[in-house]
Amino acid sequence: MRIKKVSETTPISGVVEGSTGYTKFPDGTLICYGVLENDTYPNGWTQKNISLPKSYIDTNYIVLISKRAGGTNWTSTIDRGISDTTSQAKIEIYVSDPNSATLSLNWCTIGRWK
């Protein structure tokens, strides 16, 4: 049996790199996150682009969205996230109000950086 040097092993826990808005893990997982504060959305479907703080290796990442408390009419909406490019995600918001809605949203993407 050959014993591997420490330099030949890949850690399975810990953080490789991280800053405000993202964390990279040794197994290749990348999590990016942020907040859209008090954006106004008109009645109907609206699409917003999110520039990701770090790029993914491909577009096979997921986009999660949650509404934050505050704003107006935040319960009368439907939202969905779309992985668009390796460095940009899109969110789509549907507001069912004849006027508009002011929303604050948390977003999170999870995928691979290597």
Image: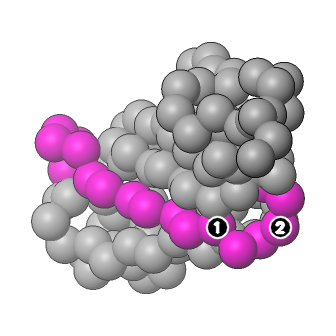
* Residue under pointer 2: 58
Relative to 55, residue 57 above or below:
below
Q: Residue 65, position in %: x, y?
A: 39, 59
Relative to 110, residue 98 above or below:
below
Q: Are marks 2 and 1 in contact (CB under 8 Å)?
A: yes
Please name the residue shown 64% across and 59% down the image: 111
Relative to 37, residue 48 above or below:
below
Reply yes or no: does residue 61 show up in magenta: yes
Q: Nearer the viewer, residue 33 or 97?
A: 33
Q: Dot 2: within a 10 Å radius of its alpha carbon, few (fewer than 14), some, or many (20 or more) residues?
A: some
| Amino acid tagged 2 | Asp
Tell me if residue 50 can be seen. Answer: no
Q: Residue 49, position in %: x, y?
A: 69, 57
Q: Which residues are magenta?
A: 56-72
Relative to 62, residue 15 above or below:
above
| Amino acid tagged 1 | Tyr
Please name the residue shown 61% across and 74% down the image: 82
- Left/right of residue 90 with respect to residue 33 in the rendered view: right
Secondary structure at numbered mark 2: loop
Please name the residue shown 39% across and 73% down the image: 79
Residue 71 occupies which quadrant of the picture?
top left
Q: Residue 101, position in %: x, y?
A: 31, 58
- Left/right of residue 94 with respect to residue 52 in the rendered view: left
- Image mark count: 2
* Residue under pointer 1: 61
Q: Residue 99, position in %: x, y?
A: 31, 67
- Left/right of residue 104 with respect to residue 58 in the rendered view: left
Tell me if residue 79 can be seen. Answer: yes
Secondary structure at numbered mark 1: loop
